Image (cartoon, rainbow, N blue to C red):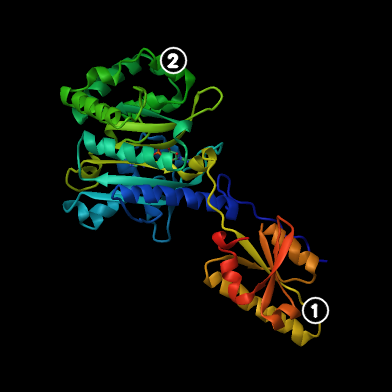
């Protein structure tokens, strides 16, 4: 007797997507891409694996992602590679390696798998899908507002606007942050022993701003009395942020100023923002569905000329979790051969059914051929495929050039001449 083979489980934090879920993801992605196209963004694709060094240099050694979430491995040539944890670094790496940094601005969108070794929970996976946009090489408050407006329109397109709130902050210019880092560091050093190990490590690595992002309650209590970045902004940075807020107001986009919002990646400067879930009953804030900001130093950090950039990315699983919008589903038609009689007749009816199904598909209809060993099983199949109509084709129909159309919800049926069958299913022609 053969032993039962051991089943292989999916990797923790990854998902298999079957049609009902994947159709929704594709529908959401398509909706976002169509809004991004209306804003003049075009599609871009970069590899899923990149040199590990890219993420160390762009996201920062003190970021959670680099410290503990990357899927890093050596290939057979001993190169250190990493499954991309986010899309921005790869897009900028690609811009520079393709020599495109000099003929901007560029406006691109992308979608695909990202990988982070995080603890899986609601809306959080180890392999997840992001849709992101990057506006490269055009500076200023109006660009920030335009990119946030794009995010808002994307969320509106999938009926999510009343489920989210826009949190916004500024990280100021380089000089503002240098000044602030110094005072924040002095403050945090006084509490070093009480801070979480993660935050102490961030202090050691010089990633002082990352401490503001700590998930530890005690760290957050200590931070309540910490100096605020807002108090250390240069006049120009403050003016820039005022202009962004003014632009959002001019478009009627409501936002909450959240001075604790620093984002988890080192490359940000000036405007940063997140659309976070609003819990329906309590109005409490939940998971971030879409987040981004300006990153004016990244191109230079990766070897290109100084280039202002702004962008965002949204977690597709999170958008699907919150959006109740369903992809439009076509009217399904079952073509059911009634195979009775001698084997030549059975074969002729089956072939006829395949031809009728193809003719209907050629006219744009969605058709399942429901062949099987009994009429009962065939009709069950039609039910499983959620068909609204069954086109019954037997020997009589074959000879008379007709089809018997059964309305599966209304329990009525009509005999339809075959040449009129495709038009019969056009919504306007339905009886
Ligand atoms: P991020 O905030 O790390 O930013 O991720 C953006 C979005 O990806 C989050 O708001 C969330 O919806 C989704 N996301 C992140 N981690 C997970 C996860 N483990 N499972 C499911 N969804 C997740 C970035 O990635 C930046 N590259 C965004 C950006 C583009 N900034 C400028 N340009």
In the image as oriented, which residue stretches furthest toward the right? 1
Q: Is residue 144 above or below residue 11?
A: above
Q: Determine whether the residue tagged by mark 1 lies in a helix, strand or loop.
A: loop
Q: Nearer the viewer, residue 279 or 304?
A: 279
Using the numbered discs, state the Cα–Cα distance from disc 1 to disc 2 in whole angstroms.
78 Å
N-terminal label among 1 and 2: 2
Quadrant of the displayed image that contains ligand 1: top left
Image point 30% across, 18% down: which residue?
228
Residue 249 relative to residue 153: left or right: left
Residue 243 relative to residue 116: left or right: left
Image point 23% across, 45% down: which residue?
299
**Quadrant location of residue 143?**
top left
Q: Is residue 349 above or below residue 179?
A: below
In the image as oriented, which residue stretches furthest toward the bottom? 344
Q: Is residue 265 visible?
A: yes
Q: Nearer the viewer, residue 314 or 12?
A: 314
**Quadrant location of residue 240?**
top left
Q: Position of residue 174 (x, y in %)?
A: 21, 30
Neighbourhood count class around disc 2 (C-alpha, 10 Å): few under 14, some 14–19, many 20 upward: few
Residue 268 relative to residue 224: left or right: left
Q: Nearer the viewer, residue 397 or 377?
A: 397
Q: Is residue 375 above or below residue 161?
A: below
**Dot label at residue 221:** 2
Q: Is residue 152 above or below residue 402?
A: above
The residue mark sitting in front, 1 or 2, is: 1
Q: Determine whether the residue tagged by mark 2 lies in a helix, strand or loop.
A: helix
Image point 41% across, 54% down: which residue?
48
**Dot label at residue 340:** 1
């Amino acid at each position: 007797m053969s032993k039962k083979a051991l089943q292989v489980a999916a990797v923790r934090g990854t998902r298999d997507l079957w049609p009902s879920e994947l159709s929704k993801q594709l529908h959401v992605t398509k909706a976002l891409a169509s809004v991004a196209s209306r804003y003049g963004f075009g599609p871009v694709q970069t590899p899923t694996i990149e040199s590990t060094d890219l993420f160390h240099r762009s996201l920062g050694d003190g970021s959670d992602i680099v410290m503990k979430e990357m899927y890093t491995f050596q290939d057979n040539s001993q190169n250190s590679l990493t499954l991309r944890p986010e899309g921005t670094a790869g897009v900028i790496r690609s811009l520079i390696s393709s020599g495109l940094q000099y003929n901007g601005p560029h406006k691109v969108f992308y979608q695909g798998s990202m990988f982070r070794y995080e603890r899986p929970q609601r809306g959080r996976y180890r392999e997840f899908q992001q849709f992101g946009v990057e506006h490269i090489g055009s500076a200023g408050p109006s660009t920030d507002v335009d990119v946030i407006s794009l995010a808002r329109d994307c969320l509106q397109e999938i009926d999510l606007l009343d489920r989210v709130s826009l949190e916004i902050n500024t990280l100021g210019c380089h000089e503002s942050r240098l000044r602030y880092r110094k005072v924040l560091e002095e403050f945090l050093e006084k509490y070093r022993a009480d801070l979480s190990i993660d935050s102490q490590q961030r202090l050691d690595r010089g990633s002082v701003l990352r401490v503001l992002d700590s998930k530890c309650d005690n760290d957050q209590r200590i931070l309540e009395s910490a100096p605020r970045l807002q108090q250390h902004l240069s006049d120009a940075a403050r003016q820039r942020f005022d202009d962004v807020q003014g632009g959002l107001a001019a478009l009627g986009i409501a936002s909450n100023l959240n001075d604790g919002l620093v984002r988890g990646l080192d490359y940000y400067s000036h405007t940063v923002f997140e659309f976070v879930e609003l819990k329906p009953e309590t109005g409490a804030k939940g998971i971030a569905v879409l987040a981004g900001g300006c990153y004016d130093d990244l191109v230079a950090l990766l070897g290109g000329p100084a280039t202002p950039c702004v962008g965002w990315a949204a977690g597709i699983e999170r958008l699907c979790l919150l959006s109740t919008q369903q992809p439009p589903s076509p009217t399904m038609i079952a073509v059911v051969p009634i195979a009775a009689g001698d084997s030549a007749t059975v074969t002729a009816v089956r072939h006829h059914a395949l031809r009728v199904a193809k003719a209907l598909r050629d006219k744009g209809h969605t058709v399942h051929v429901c062949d099987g060993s009994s009429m009962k099983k065939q009709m069950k199949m039609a039910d499983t495929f959620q068909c609204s109509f069954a086109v019954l084709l037997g020997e009589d129909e074959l000879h008379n050039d007709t089809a018997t159309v059964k309305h599966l919800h209304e329990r009525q049926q009509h005999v339809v001449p075959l040449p009129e069958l495709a038009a019969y299913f056009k919504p306007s022609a339905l009886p």
